[in-house]
Amino acid sequence: MATARASTIANVPRFCDSRQGMKNLEDDLTSAEALAAPLHEIERMMRAQGRELMRTMMQAHLDARTAQERPVSVRGADGVERVQTRQGTRTLMTEYGEVVLERTLYQAPGVDALARSMPRWAWPRRSTRTRCAGSSPRRVRARRSTRWSSS
């Protein structure tokens, strides 16, 4: 199944950036400079480019989830139905770097706009707590304890 899914992903336009990132990494690894470089420099290059590759794949995944979002009826806790919609964005910091989540916001005059609750997304706590540079013990603990569900 993984092979079939990989060929499907290769044909999805939103994954173009990650495919290009992989091609760039392959080209860099086979360059004359890389073949003559010490291994610690290769590891450093792979770590940086690999993290960016993972970030672009995460962004493509979020874009795919956004594309599945369908309009719904939204009534806030204040009892006001939100019938107008607009697109909004939210910046998230993941362990791979910053990504942008596009969402449909539901609004009505005189009240705050709301985004539909999406329980399947179940972001780990670290996705909203890693805005600071560096790795505090709290951040490392949150990253280690993260478990992804298959739902």
Image: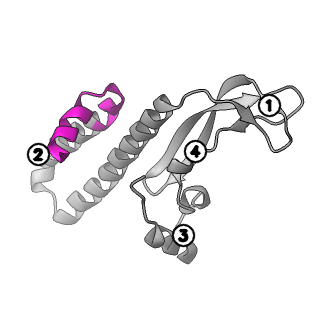
- Examine the image and state in which quarter residue 4 appears: top left
Q: How far apart are marks 3 and 4 (CA)?
A: 24 Å
| Near-viewer residue (108 or 102) | 108
**Residue 118 disc label:** 4
**Residue 139 disc label:** 3
Locate residue 138, reporting x and y percent.
57, 74
**Residue 81 disc label:** 1
Q: In this view, does 30 lie above or below 147?
A: above
Would residue 19 be found to the left or right of residue 120 on screen?
left
Q: How far apart are marks 3 and 1 (CA)?
A: 38 Å
Q: Which amino acid does label 1 sit on?
A: Glu
Q: Residue at x 42, y 58 (%)?
A: 149
Locate residue 106, reporting x and y percent.
71, 30
**Element type at marker 3?**
helix
**Element type at marker 4?**
loop
**Residue 38 disc label:** none
Q: Distance between the residues labelled 4 and 1?
A: 18 Å
Q: Distance between the residues labelled 1 and 2?
A: 58 Å
How crowded is the residue under tag 3: few (<14 C-alpha within 10 Å), some, or many (20+)? some
Q: Is residue 17 magenta?
A: yes
Q: In this view, does 95 lie above or below 19?
A: below
Numbered disc total: 4
**Residue 30 disc label:** 2
How crowded is the residue under tag 2: few (<14 C-alpha within 10 Å), some, or many (20+)? few
Locate residue 132, reporting x and y percent.
60, 60
Which residues are drawn in magenta? 1-18
N-terminal of the two: label 3 or label 4? Answer: 4
- Mark 1 touches mark 2? (CB < 8 Å): no
